Amino acid sequence: MATVSPLNSAAETRLSFSVNGRSVSLSVSPAERLSRALRESLGLTGTKIGCDAGDCGACTVLLDGQPVCACLVAAGQAEGREVTTVEGLADRAPLFGRLQDSFLRHGAAQCGICTPGMLISATALLERNTTPSENEVMDAIGGVLCRCTGYRKIITAVQEASANECAEPSPSAGHAVGTRLVRLDGKHKVQGIEIFGADEIPAGTLLVRAVRSPFDRASFIFGDLDAFVVAHPGVHRVFTAKDIPGRNCYGVIPRFADQPVFAESEARFRGEAVAAVVGDAGVIEALDLADFPVSWSALPALAEIDQALAPDAALVHNNREGNVLVRGRVVRGDVDKALAAADVVVEDSYETGFVEHACIEPEAGFARRVGNQIEIQACTQSPYMDRDDIAKILAIPPEAVRIIPTAVGGGFGTKLDLSVQPFVALAAWHLGQPVRMVYTRHESIMSTTKRHAARMRMRAGASRDGKITAVDFTADFNTGAYSSWGPTVTARVPVHASGPYVVPHYRALTRAVHTHLVPAGAFRGFGVPQTAIAQEQLYDDLADKLGIDRLEFRILNALTNETPTVTGQVLGAGVGIRACLEALRPRWKAARAESSVFSANARGPLRRGVGIAGMWYGCGNTSLPNPSTIRVGLEADGRIALHQGAVDIGQGSNTIVTQICADALGAPIDRFDLVSGDTAITPDCGKTSASRQTFVTGKAAHMAGSELRRAIVRWAGCCDCASITFGEGWVNVTEGEKQQTIHLRDLPRDERGYVLAREATFDPPTSPLDENGQGIPYAVFGFGAHLAEIEVDIELGTVRVLKITAAHDVGRAINPTLIEGQIEGGAAQGLGMALMEEFFPGKGENLHDYLIPSAGDMPPVESILIEDPSPIGPFGAKGIGEQAVIPTAPAILNAIHDATGVRIRRIPATPDRVRAAILAAQREGQHA
Ligand code: FES
Ligand code: FES
């Protein structure tokens, strides 16, 4: 692999400066961004590019010892100066070594894309202050955004870098599960040498850029494309729909697949690709696509759900009547009768906007043709799904497509859908040269999926003794122009809209509605976070109306092992919601008392409030197969290869799946070699989504490890109770007095080179739902509850979150550090959703208008891990990734109500909305 030549070759000058202690001399334009010069000319790809606009801090380097955003520094400004990138920090031992160790020990790097920027900023701080306060750390890293961690572990890691602590020693055989094992793929992240989608390309790689619709809806006609190519030396070819050898259509759910690689005559959303231009990197980079020969005719577009549902609305897709992509339904009992008979009934409506994933890594990758095969190296959450869609697009067998996932710089659901893959594959296939593509931040926000905007209405009734008797829920989701994961959201939400409570009479009806907006897809929680905003606020109102403490109301109604869910499923074991809520009781009481005293004595505009919200989440696909297959092989030298195809997007599946397999096999963890996520060498572990990897892939790893163990003891003629020890080229099996040594190097090997290997597949036992949504949608649910303590400035409408306490039933905490990381990161995304994040298509397609929480926004998060084991999960484990985000926003919204008496029904609760609600309440003579 090599790096390409500088992309901007105009007016090159020879510049001399020092990089990581070495003098370098480069011929680049003095106006070239320093970040680009470092990456493209010097191969220092530890400097990441997340925005090219000074917003994300991923490109932070030291310039004469001071942290700067390298994307805002012209290469000419570095002339004669000293630049230090993350690769150069290794020279700053021992300080940097201690900082790296601290990052690993505290789980401060998840996906790792922000880690170089964080390490650079932290090093600059620690060089002048070895014992920084929390605020000093927050100031130092305040310009670097992290979408994964929630910042708290980063802050702790920086503060404790000087502490002479060591990571826990590697656990002995059989004791990996439950330990705070440092993530197995962590070293590369803290060295800045992890390879992300944009970091590696073969020599001579061409660049592709997409031509995208500037209108929400438009027809278009191309001009003379051949003349365009001729007029632009260095442009090799233009591709349109006509060049697709197979189907110009893809989609994550084959039955609903509807998205073209290139629109054919009408673009259905702003940002939809209609063509792609491929050529020499510098030429393509510099092209002004405003000159591209295409004529647009803007057409009337549907943006709102009501517009799309109007009887005379144009159809976004002719085969989808009324613009409804799909409906969801769960009905149990007689909800109308139960509501009529209820002692207390409450009702309200809620709205949520689109939310942008804002992964710090924009989509990127390259493809190359190898004979009649295509290889794609790109960031993805779903290599096997990518493979199957690319095969259809190129009209080649799936086996002719190899997907090699890079590290993923944050996914959260959006990298389940194809992005760069079809463009680079198509171009490389036709041109026979490697082709790469890197989305700009603008392009990423404009064209990739969003969290569905939702409009929800809910009625809930209860008897005087505080028991919920009925819930009636409807929700419409704006699913945008193409189906993506709309059907999944529509199916999952009705199952979850009751919350983790007993609701004997229930009706939940959902619709995914097409509009001419960017497609909405998967985003952590698949619609359940929106649903929880309705259900948990309304349950607070119900509790208030009944005069029952809001936490006790939830405990009173919590599901148990014996009570049926709204789909009639009786879980029988592992229902930990009550334990989560009870774990919060002491803090709830103390926080309520503290906030009442504070607000009662308030003289200024500040008021405090406390809110609580519960959640549940079914792990894996809803009533659909979603198997994972794991292969584990014993090598002649006594090492163990774990083929696990689950893509670790930062959540830690590489580590957790290995911990599970190690204990099932009875081997020490440091004997394992990971073989990860390449469709040519790992079996299919499904997509990384829906909190399924710990549960589903972990279970397959448990089965494969157990089967290999069984095979080894049988080999030695022993029973399952025998113990095994592994050594260099041998395995010892001991059963009582009997001991046998197997010399592995003497044994024949299979076609993969293993002396013994086992493969196991696990598919969670679920059943299809009937016409009323009754059945077993998920084999395992995770449960949790969050408590938010907040402060509201009632004059400004600003909300500050002071603390989040999060209790989650994870079944078995395979790796507590990684689980806490998921909880804290989920809480940060929930806080963003509650208070600041809303995407308006066509506006603010960058990270200075679209705000996500920074270090200064995040309060301390206390995680309480409840272990109510699942009878099915590996060692009792359940998922946590999606769960963590669900209760934060409703807990914050309930806390705002607690502090001010006003309900925020349209989120995010931005200062203008909070202030307007307070003024309205004051006009009506209510609270606040
Ligand atoms: S890439 Fe420089 S701040 Fe984002
Ligand atoms: S670890 Fe910070 S963005 Fe992923």
Image (spheres, grey):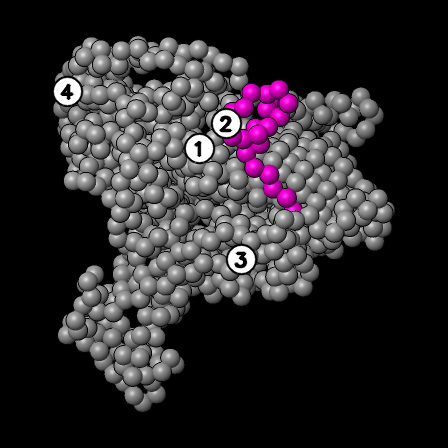
Q: As drawn, is 868 to the left or to the right of 663?
A: right
The quarter of the picture where the C terminus appears is top right
Instruction: Identify residue for label 2.
Output: 317
Q: CA distance from mark 4 to mark 1?
A: 47 Å
Specify whether residue 686 is painted magenta: no
3D distance between C-alphas at marks 1 and 3: 27 Å
Q: Decide: marks 4, 1 in contact (CB < 8 A)?
A: no
Q: Badge 1 is on which residue?
A: 258
Name the element at disc 1.
loop
Amino acid tagged 1: Asp
Q: Give the Cα separation between the discs numbered 4 and 2.
A: 52 Å
Report if the CB atoms under discs 1 and 2 are less than 8 Å apart. Answer: yes
Reply above or below: 358 against 12. Answer: below
Image quadrant assignment for residue 888: top right
Q: Position of residue 783 (x, y in %)?
A: 59, 53
Specify whether residue 414 is in view: no
Foreground of the two, 704 or 674: 704
Residue at 20% across, 32% down: 434
Q: Magenta segment, which residues?
A: 307-330
Pointer 3 residue: 766
Q: Earlier in the sequence, mark 1 or mark 3?
A: 1
The residue lying furthest to the bottom in this view is 737
- Label number found at residue 27: 4
Disc 4 crowd, CA 10 A, few/some/many (<14, 14-19, 20+): some
Residue 726 picture quarter:
bottom left
Q: Is residue 575 left or right of residue 622?
A: right
